[in-house]
Amino acid sequence: MDISDILTKCDHTLLRVDCRAEEIRTLCDQAIRYHCASVCIPPCHVAGAKRYVGDRLAICTVIGFPNGYMTTAAKAFEAADAVKNGADEIDMVVNLSMVKDAAWNEVAKDIVAVRKATEGKILKVIIECCLLTEEEKLQLCRIVSDSGADFIKTSTGFSTGGATREDVKLMRENCPARVKVKAAGGISSLQDAEDFIALGAERLGTSRIVKLAIAQEQENG
């Protein structure tokens, strides 16, 4: 697969806690240049990034990040605020405390509340596969699929592990076609990207692929 095709599936990501506005603008410039799907940035940078890019690029942000254990009301408010500030896409973290309690109805209500707060925008639900059992992953495939979310996402990239080929395959096989899969965390090579896409991922959360594209350009003069 050509790198230019891979880049169109990338959410060019910068979620470091001390990232500066200048870095976010550079991220946006790179994403526009390489035709990325979006930039994924912290909520505090959404309004400034939206002013900077206008309609040239989708702005994605994170909600309940990275731990997911905020109250449902807090997540819904945070999501609505992000949309008000210009976010086009929302990546929320499920409440893993509820998951471990097998409080599946509450897990579902948590996601649905954010879905209602982000109506008309793309919603991706991060289930943090590295912390889940196989049964929990399967339960969350069902719940996310029933919630009205647009994507199910493997990882925050801030926990004990990132996307794996096995998890992407499991998610694709256990969610309906209308629910897309996003792989994120630890995607460090073109081979990783190609493998995840081949297994059914339609989005990749990474900054590495753009860096590889820049390096290729520099090598070619």
Image (spheres, rainbow, N blue to C red):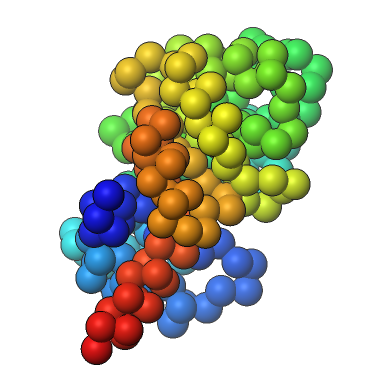
Residue lying at the far bottom in this picture: please name it: 221
- Residue at the location (29% across, 33% down)? 120
Where residue 104 sits in the image (x, y, percent)?
67, 12
- Residue at the location (69% across, 14% down)? 135
- Residue at the location (52% across, 53% down)? 187
Where residue 128 sits in the image (x, y, percent)?
64, 36
Q: Is residue 97 above or below residue 34?
A: above
Viewer can see residue 147: no
Q: Is residue 152 above or below residue 101?
A: below
- 216 relative position to 92: left or right: left
Residue lying at the far right in this picture: please name it: 101
- 70 relative position to 208: left or right: right
Viewer can see residue 21: yes
Where residue 180 sits in the image (x, y, percent)?
37, 29
Where residue 201 sits in the image (x, y, percent)?
40, 35
Q: In which quarter of the image is the C terminus?
A: bottom left
Task: Name the image quarter holding residue 46.
Answer: bottom left
